[in-house]
Amino acid sequence: MLNPRIFGRSIVLRLVILVIFQSLCAAFFVAELVTEVLGLRHWAISWTMREFLQIGASLGLVLGAAASFTLLRQTLYRVDRVEKQVKVASGQFVDVLHDQFCAWGLSPAEREVALFAVRGYSNAEIAKARGKSEATVKSQLNAIFRKADVPGRTALVCHFIDVVLENIPDPSTTYGPLADNGDQ
């Protein structure tokens, strides 16, 4: 059974409605076929009404398939997000980093520089650790920022903090508007 706490109440409700609707459309076609093949049809409906019912059931099945595809895509997206959160929660943060670096299309050298940057190393420290010039490191960092679509080192680190904090509710929605009481 689908757990509403995992998949969201609205998705579970939409899936249930969709399954009921598709089942009714399929039942119509099966009943139509069985009564026609076995000669059990004892009611008379006009051909026009019969055609409208078949068109409606067909549209129901097509719309149901389209909705099923959309819901499947949403579910797979949620599963991917949950797997990422589980990795982070289970201490596999480095795997999440490397997966994101691959998704951004970073070269092996850029991945190494990005990892140093996320860990808080300065350009000089990265250059020394890698045996490269600071200009090379700066160039690689600029390429990383461009591929990651972030303005700089702080935003790069914040991206991964957001991954860790993704499921923690926003304080303004939990506690109401934040008051400025001088605490900074």
Image (tube, grey):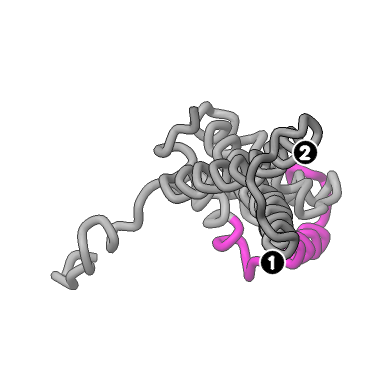
Quadrant showing the C terminus: bottom left
User: Of circles 1 and 2, which is in front?
Assistant: 2
**Main SS class of the magenta portion in the image:** helix
Q: Residue at x 74, y 48 (%)?
A: 101
Residue type at the position of mark 1: Asp
Q: Is residue 1 above or below residue 181?
A: above
Name the residue carrying label 1: 149
Name the residue carrying label 2: 36
180 sits left or right of 16 in the view: left
Q: In x, y percent, where is residue 153?
A: 61, 61
For the question of whether residue 46 can be seen, the reply is yes
Residue in the foreground of this view, choosing between 66 and 52: 52
Q: In x, y percent, where is residue 22?
A: 62, 45
Q: What is the magenta range?
A: 128-156
Asked if residue 51 lies in the magenta stretch, the reply is: no
Residue in the foreground of this view, choosing between 107 and 62: 62
Asked if residue 140 lies in the magenta stretch, the reply is: yes
Q: In x, y percent, where is residue 131?
A: 82, 45
- The image quadrant that residue 122 belongs to is bottom right
Q: Residue at x 77, y 30 (%)?
A: 38
